[in-house]
Image (cartoon, helix red, strand yellow):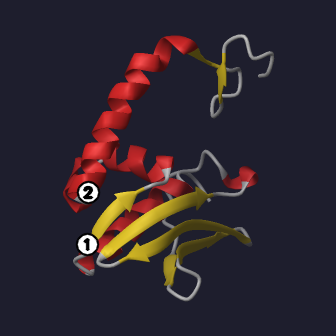
Amino acid sequence: MGIGSEIIVRHNPKARRYEAEVDGRLAVAEYTRAGERIVFTHTFVPPELRRRGIAGQLVRNALEDVRLQRRRVVPACRYVAAFIRRNPEFQGLVDAPARQRAARGASARRARSGRFRRSRRRSSRTCRGSGRG
């Protein structure tokens, strides 16, 4: 499967997640329900499938489904929050209190950015002087 290939995403309400099976492996976007809100808690793509756009397609399909259900989104998962920031067509789905918390969180992250550095591994952040990373 190439980066631009479509994947099939299915909603598994019993497991409270959206799923995509690719090359026999399962990628998921997990959620909980809080009234009329869908709280995305975790997105996972197996390491061997990463960097192929699978998480983005999975989250895009999940958010489109939430939009069809006329529900609000709380992006507790950092990947979902970043995806929504990068894709303004989904920003209207975010629950207003969650949007305010996200804005405060972004300000706090910018304020602390001097204390953190990127490690050699692109996906992790380490604190300077911790001796790790």
Whole-percent x and y of residue 125? 63, 27
77 up-or-down from 18: above or below: above
Residue positioned 41% across, 43% down in the render: 82
Residue position for label 2: 90
Q: Residue at x 50, y 80 (%)?
A: 10
Location of mark 1 (residue): 67
Q: Quadrant of residue 23?
A: bottom right
Residue 90 x, y percent position in the rendering: 26, 57
Q: Which corner quadrant holds the N terminus?
A: bottom right
- Of 23 and 33, the residue lying toward us: 33
What is the residue that sits farthest to the right in this orientation?
A: 131
Label 2 is placed on what type of residue?
Phe
Local SS, label 1: helix
For the residues labelled 1 and 2, say whether their Cβ atoms are less than 8 Å apart: yes
Image quarter of residue 39: bottom left
Which numbered disc flags the more N-terminal residue, 1 or 2?
A: 1
- The secondary element bearing badge 2 is classed as helix
Q: Is residue 65 above or below residue 79?
A: below
Mark 1: few/some/many CA within 10 Å (<14, 14-19, 20+): some
Q: Position of residue 15 (x, y in %)?
A: 59, 82
Disc 1 versus disc 2: distance between alpha carbons?
Answer: 9 Å
Residue placed furthest toward the bottom: 14
Number of residue marks: 2
The quadrant where residue 130 appears: top right
* Quarter the C terminus occupies: top right
Is residue 38 positioned above or below 92 on the image? below
Please, what is the three-letter code of the amino acid marked with disc 1? Arg
Residue 54 is labelled as none
The residue depicted at 25 percent of the width and 54 percent of the height is: 97
User: Which class describes the residues within 10 Å of circle 2: few (<14), some (14-19), or many (20+)?
Assistant: some
Is 98 or 18 nearer to us in this picture? 98
